[in-house]
């Protein structure tokens, strides 16, 4: 289900409540095939606490100056992307997984491109942009978030956009298209089902069951 809501608004934060969101899929998919690591366990506890209390944990949200800069630079990066690709970017909104499971998954891309595409934007420092230009592809740390956009948002592809205003003009924008991969989605679905069970077990602890 798609909800046309603006990121970082009160409505957007409320939609994220009680859901495991794609920005944390990397933590959940770590150690795939093995027991969940500490980051995934802590995130499960956070989701469980939101589920029981109905309130988000304000102290768990980490922000720094780079993240604030990213929010300010994102519209510039999207505008440059539209100019370079001739794509029209619409609001990313918030996607909620269609599921009968009591623990739901949520996803919020940085924009939608038509019916089949979406984007994920990262504003970075020069050293990071240099590394991406030399290596190509996408950072492994964003792999699961990007495929989460494709899976939960029911897309065919996602354009990963890396923007660095300090670089020479022709190197400020880096774009890498990631296509839907059924094998990756099957692996994610299996792992997320296990994660949902982990959250439910934490909920039982909080409810003294």
Image (cartoon, helix red, strand yellow):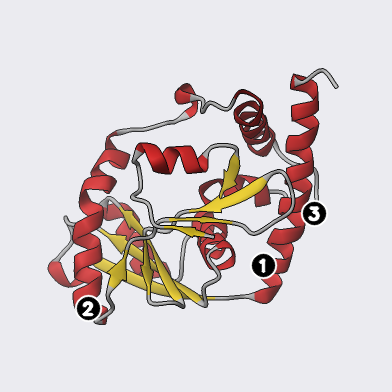
164 displayed left or right of 201: left
Q: CA distance from mark 3 to mark 2?
A: 40 Å
Q: CA distance from mark 2 to mark 1?
A: 29 Å
Of label 3 and label 2, which has the lower sequence position? 3
Frontmost residue, 180 versus 131? 180
Name above or below for residue 17 compared with residue 154. Answer: above
Q: Which residue is mark 2?
A: 84
The percent coordinates of residue 37 (x first, y second) are: 71, 38
The percent coordinates of residue 184 (x first, y second) are: 67, 68
Q: CA distance from mark 3 to mark 1?
A: 15 Å
Q: Quadrant of residue 76?
A: bottom left
The percent coordinates of residue 29 (x first, y second) are: 67, 52
Dot 3 falls on a residue whose secondary structure is: loop
Dot 1 falls on a residue whose secondary structure is: helix
Q: Which residue is mark 1?
A: 185
The residue at the far right in this view is 209
Of label 3 and label 1, which has the lower sequence position? 3
Q: What residue is drawn where x is 71% and y is 52%?
A: 192
The percent coordinates of residue 139 (x first, y second) are: 47, 60
Asked if one can make out residue 6 in the rendered structure from this viewpoint, the answer is yes
Q: What residue is drawn where x is 69% and y is 56%?
A: 99
Dot 2 falls on a residue whose secondary structure is: helix
159 displayed left or right of 2: left
Q: What residue is drawn where x is 34% and y is 72%?
A: 175
Disc 3 vs disc 1: which is toward the camera?
1
Say how many tags the image has: 3
Asked if one can make out residue 172 in the rendered structure from this viewpoint, the answer is no
């Amino acid at each position: 289900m798609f909800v046309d809501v603006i990121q970082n608004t009160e409505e957007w934060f409320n939609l994220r409540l009680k859901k495991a969101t794609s920005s944390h899929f990397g933590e959940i998919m770590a150690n795939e095939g093995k027991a969940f690591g500490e980051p995934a366990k802590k995130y499960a506890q956070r989701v469980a606490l939101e589920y029981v209390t109905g309130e988000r944990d304000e102290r768990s949200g980490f922000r720094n100056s780079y993240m604030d800069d990213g929010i300010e630079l994102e519209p510039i990066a999207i505008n440059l992307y539209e100019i370079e690709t001739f794509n029209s970017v619409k609001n990313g909104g918030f996607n909620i997984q269609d599921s009968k499971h009591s623990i739901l998954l949520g996803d919020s891309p940085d924009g939608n491109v038509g019916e089949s595409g979406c984007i994920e934007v990262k504003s970075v420092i020069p050293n990071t942009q240099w590394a991406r230009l030399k290596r190509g592809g996408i950072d492994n740390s964003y792999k699961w978030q990007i495929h989460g956009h494709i899976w939960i948002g029911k897309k065919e592809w996602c354009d990963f956009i890396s923007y660095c205003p300090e670089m020479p003009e022709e190197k400020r924008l880096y774009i890498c298209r990631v296509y839907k991969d059924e094998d990756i989605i099957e692996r994610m679905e299996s792992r997320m089902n296990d994660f949902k069970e982990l959250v439910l077990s934490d909920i039982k602890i909080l409810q003294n069951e």
